[in-house]
Amino acid sequence: MTSLLVVLLLSLLELMSIPVVVAQKKDATGLVYGIVIYQDKKPAKGATVYATPLGRPIGAVIPHADSDDTGYYAIRIPRSWFGNFAVAAKKEDEDYPDMSKQFYSDGKFQTVTISASHPEANVVIRLGPQAGVLRGTVVDAHSDESLSPCVEFRRAAKLNNFLSGSGLVKPTYKLLIPPDTDVLMQISLDGYRTWYFPGTIDKETQRPVRLRPGETKTVDIRLVPDESAKTGCPKPIGVFSAR
């Protein structure tokens, strides 16, 4: 009997010495979800929704998701990204511009805060109005050679709110313009005189373009060669600002 008690006691002490492993919960992710609808409240399929961090530098792909047949979307937010977000959408195939760009939103966007205590946010996004559409071609005025220049758009009433860069305009282009808004437009390329809307190389005679929602305007651009002209095209910019 004594031997049995000793064995049981030793077994108990051995069990007590085994370290207890507690399963640790993985870092939780946040969630921004909801539906995208048109102005008539019908679901919008295939819209891309962005959750853009506010007040912080962005050095990675912005969290985003596409809406399904019912308009539903869900964006996972890594824990390390928790904070304030602007939530906006685009559906450019139907001429709804990328409202995650300050140039189009003009600061009018929905915001949410994702935190450990409030890890989810439900945001309903209504598309619209549609943008105005500029389309046309860009060629050398002497040779008719197709060109891919730089473009710069500025809201005439807010010159510091702009969208610019190379790669936005192709030889045959389509550009979305904020509707019912005066927008200054210039086209530039190394080796050519800068072109200003509606078709001048004299900056003093430029005029803003203004289009209604869904209105399309064709503008064929002919750039005049000038070997001394240097523009230094920037990369596309014009996303949300922390201002």
Image (cartoon, rainbow, N blue to C red):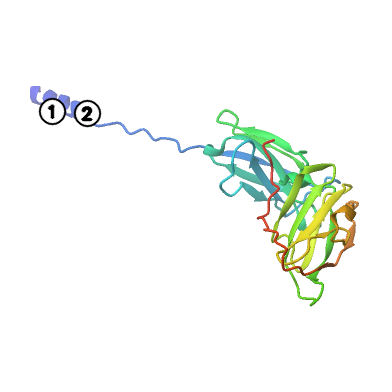
Q: Is residue 196 left or right of residue 60?
A: right
Which residue shows up at 9% across the image and 22% down it? 2
In this view, the mark in front (2 or 1): 2
Q: Is residue 96 left or right of residue 239?
A: right
The N terminus lies in which quarter of the figure?
top left
Residue 54, by quadrant, is top right
Q: Residues within 10 Å of mark 2 (few under 14, many from 20)?
A: few
Which residue shows up at 56% across the image and 38% down it? 81
User: Disc 2 and disc 1: Cα gap in Å?
Assistant: 16 Å
Q: Secondary structure at mark 2?
A: helix
Which residue shows up at 72% across the image and 68% down it? 227
The type of residue carrying mark 1 is Val
Residue 144, by quadrant, is bottom right
Q: Determine which residue is flagged by label 1.
A: 7
Viewer-nearest residue: 5 or 25 = 25
Viewer-nearest residue: 42 or 137 = 137
Horizontal and vertical percent position of residue 192: 75, 66
Of labels 2 and 1, earlier in sequence is 1
Which residue is farthest front?
228
Number of numbered tags placed on the structure image: 2
| Residue 17 disc label | 2
Horizontal and vertical percent position of residue 199: 87, 62
Q: Residues within 10 Å of mark 1 (few under 14, many from 20)?
A: few
Horizontal and vertical percent position of residue 186: 80, 57
Horizontal and vertical percent position of residue 169: 74, 62
| Residue 74 disc label | none
The type of residue carrying mark 2 is Ser
Which residue shows up at 78% across the image and 41% down it? 106
